[in-house]
Structures are given as structure tokens and as C-alpha cells.
Image (spheres, rainbow, N blue to C red):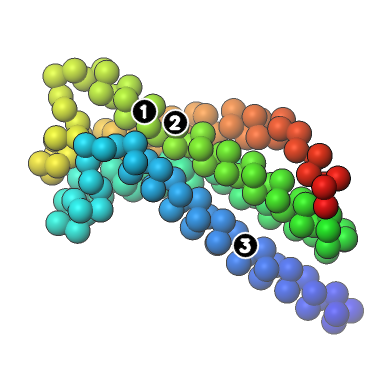
Amino acid sequence: MFEKFFGSIAIAFFKLFIGLLLSIGSVYLGIHMLNRLTNELEEWKEIKKGNFSVGVLLAGVILSIAVVIEGGVRNVMESITPAVSLSLLFASVIIASIKLFIGVLIAVFAVHLAIRVIDWLTPDINEMQELKKGNIAVAVVMASVMIAIAFVIKSSVDIVLDSLDLSFIISLV
């Protein structure tokens, strides 16, 4: 009885650790990828200078990525179960992690697309220049659009990721 109880607690803490690792890694990867896509704005330099508007934009990016990848992280956590062999567990975690990585790519693409759509809809405003100047209104609108798009596409991304058949990986292990 105690072994099962402590085993369950150990698995729960292992899942928590893996979940934190994947979440932090996904957000870092997403921010890094987006930073490469927004050449005209050096986000971290602006944040170091105390540019609140860039901080708001980056917060919108982080929330958007988190909304989209939440299902992928959940899938990785659900694949960790003590009822299967170690090799099957490893293969399941690899499959779920690949899907999570694809989810991060989709999230970054969606955020980048949102920024481009805002640029297109507001030809008389150079959003990146406004952000550099500290225009908080522009940052709030951009962050809101990104977060809204993330909520709208989340279920579609989950469906796409669930439909990916990567079971051939199990045969490789």
C-alpha cells in the first residue's frame, strides 16, 4: 500500500519536473524563434532599457505560446505512466515531445502571422518603431490580438497534433 502511494507521488513529481522543463523550454524556444523573425526589434535590449511596451508584447507572446502548447504538454504528461515498459514509456515521451515541438512551431508561426496581419491592417503605423518609442497602446493591441488568435487556434492545433501518427517510433525502440 505504501509502495503504491509513494510510487504515485514519485511519478507525480517526475511529471511536474518534466512539465516544467518542457514548458520552460517551449517558451524559451518560442521566444528565441520569434526574436529571429522580428529583426527590426531587439526585444531583450529594449526590455533591459525598461521599455514597458516591449515587455507587454513579449508577455503576449509568452501567453500565446503557452495557450497553444498547453495541450502538447498535457499529452506528454499523460504518456508518462508506470503501467508500461521503460522502452514504451520512452517512445511515448519522444512521440509526445515531437508533437510538442511541432506545436511550438505552429504557435510561433501564429504569433508571427498575427504581427504581420496587424502590420498589414495598419499601414500608417510602424508597430515596431512605436514599440521602440514605448507606445503601450500598440503593445496592448498587438498582445491582445496574439492571445486571441492563440485561443482561437488552440483546438485546431490540438486536433492537428492528435492526428499525427508517429507510432512508427515505437517500433524503433
Secondary-structure class at tag 3? helix
| Element marked by disc 2 | helix
Residue drawn at 21 percent across, 37 percent down: 40
Say whether residue 137 is visible. no
Q: Position of residue 160 (x, y in %)?
A: 64, 29
The residue where tag 1 is placed is 114
Q: CB under 8 Å between callouts 3 and 1?
A: no
**Mark positioned earlier in the residue sequence (3 or 2):** 3
Question: Which of 82/173 is in front?
Answer: 173
| Circles 2, 1 touching at the beta carbon (< 8 Å) | yes
Residue that appears at 17% across and 39% down? 131
Left or right, 158 with reference to 151: right
> 10 Å neighbourhood of mark 2: few (<14), some, or many (≥20)?
many
What residue is rendered at 57% in x and 44% in y? 101
Mark positioned earlier in the residue sequence (3 or 1): 3
Q: Are marks 3 and 2 in contact (CB under 8 Å)?
A: no
Q: Which residue is mark 2?
A: 110
Q: Name the residue located 76 percent from the left edge and 34 percent from the top edge.
A: 165
Determine which of the numbered discs, if any, sits on residue 18 in the image: 3
| Helix, strand or loop status at disc 1 | helix
Looking at numbered disc 1 in the image, what kind of residue is underneath it?
Ala
Q: Amino acid at mark 3?
A: Ile
Q: Residues within 10 Å of mark 1 (few under 14, many from 20)?
A: many
Q: Position of residue 3 (x, y in %)?
A: 85, 80
Q: Amino acid at mark 2?
A: Ala
Q: Is residue 172 above or below residue 168?
A: below
- In the image shown, does 155 or 40 lie closer to the viewer? 40
